[in-house]
Amino acid sequence: MSHERIYSVVMATIGLGLAGFAAVTFDQRELDTFGILLLSAIVIALLRIKLEPFGRISLVPLIVFVGFLLVSPSSVLLLAFGTSLLGSRFFGRNPWLRVLAEAGEEGLCTFAGAIAFWDQSSFELTAFQSTILVFALAVLLYTVMRVLITVLAAYVKEGISVSNLLLGVGRSIFGHHVFLGLVALAVVFLNRQFGLLAVPLAAVALAEFYYPAKILSDQRDDLFSSLTMIAHAIDLKDVYTGRHARDVADIAIRIARVMRLPEVEVRTIRFAGLLHDIGKIGISGGIIRKPGTLTPDETAVMKRHPVIGADIMQPVELLTDAAHLVRHHHEHYDGTGYPDGLKGEEIPLGSRIVFVADAFNAMTTDRPYRRARTKAEAFRILNEKPDKQFDPKVVEALSSILSVI
C-alpha cells in the first residue's frame, strides 16, 4: 500500500471516529441552529480555492468558527465532518476514500479548535474578554492543525518540503483563517441582532468576495489541463506510450523537490517536463516511430526537436523559462550532448533533471524494439554513467524516490 493511500485510510478512520462520537453526543436542542449552519456551509462548500503548490482554502471554516460560538463542540464536529463530506463528494466529485480523508482532515482541525470550548455549553455573551480569548485560541488551534495537516499531506503525496510549504501556503492559510475568525465574530453579533438569517447572508456575501480568487484558481487548473492535453497529443505521435510527458513531469517534480528547489523553479520544471518533446511536432512521424536504428541524416533531424520545442515555447511569456530548459534537456554532463554541447554546470539544472526523468521513464516503458526494464535495472544503467551523460547529483536524488514513482 502506498504512503498516500495509508495517509488517506488513517485520515478517513479518524474522521469516522470523530463523526461517530459527535453523533452520539449531539444535543437535539441545537437542531434548529445546527440546520441553519449546515445549510449555510453547504451553500459555500462549492467555493474551494487551490493553492500553489499544494493545499486549498475554503469558506467552511467560517461556519465552523461561528459554530464554536453558537453550539456545542459535538455539534460543530458533526457540522464540519458533514459539510466536508457533502462538498468533496458532490461538488468535488472525488472518490470515496479521498472524500472520507478530506472529511477526516476537517474533523481533526475542528476537534483541535473545539478543545478550547469543550468545557462550555452553548455560547453566552457574558464575560466578553474571556470569551474572545477562548475563541482566539480555538481559531489558532484550528489553523495550526490545518497547516500541519497540509504540510504532512504535501510531503506524503507530492514530496514537498516543509520549509517550502510553510513559507507560501502556510502564510496564506494563516491569514485566511484569521480573517474568517474576525468575520465570524461579526456574524455572531449580527445573529444576536437580526437572528440566524445573518449566517447564510454573510456566507453568500463572503462567497461573492472570494469568487474572483476561485476563478483565477480554476484558470490555473485549466492551464495545466491544456498543457497536459498538448503533451498527450505529442505523445500519440509515438506508439510506445500515451502518457510519457506526464510521467516525465511527475518524476522531474519529485527529483526537484528532493533537491529542495524553490517551488517557483519546480513549476518551471513541471512545464518543461510536460512539453520537453513538443518539438517533435516538427519531426516526421516516420522518423519518430521507426523501430530500427536511425540513419545519420535521420538522427540529425531528430536532434533538432529540442530547438524546435524551445522556439515554439519562447514567445509565450508563461513558458519562456521552461523553453530554456527544453532547449537543453538533451545536453550531456560530459559535453557530448546536443544542441549546444554544454557541459556540467553550464547546463541548466532543470534541464539536467528533465533529462534524467526522461531517460528513466523511457527505459521503464515498453518500446517497439524492446521490453521495459525494471526500475532497479534502469537506475543501475543511469548510475553507471555518472559524470558522463547524467548529473550524478540528480541521479542520487532519483534514488530516493524510486519507491514512489
Image (cartoon, rainbow, N blue to C red):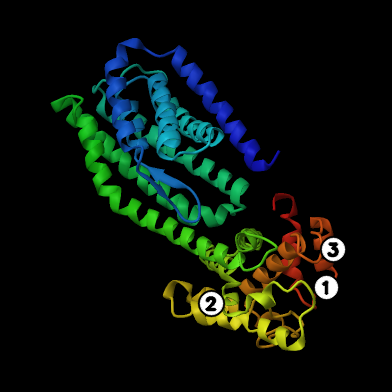
Question: Which amino acid does the dot numbered 2 rest on?
Answer: Ala
Q: Assess whether mark 3 and mark 2 are in contact (beta carbons under 8 angstroms).
A: no
Q: Are marks 1 and 3 in contact (CB under 8 Å)?
A: no
**Residue 157: x %, y % from top left:** 60, 47
Q: Which mark is residue 385?
A: 1
Query: Vertical placement of 102 versus 358: above or below?
Result: above
Residue 110 sits in quarter: top left
Visible in this render: residue 133? no
Question: Which numbered disc covers residue 174?
Answer: none
Per the image, the residue denoted by label 3 is 380
Q: Mark 2 points at which residue?
A: 323
Residue 44 picture quarter: top left
Determine the secondary structure under disc 3.
helix
Check the image and report above or below for 288 versus 45. Answer: below
Amino acid identity at mark 1: Lys
SS assignment at label 1: loop
Most extreme residue toward the left is 194
Q: Position of residue 88 (x, y in %)?
A: 44, 36
Decide if residue 144 is on the left or right side of residue 244. left
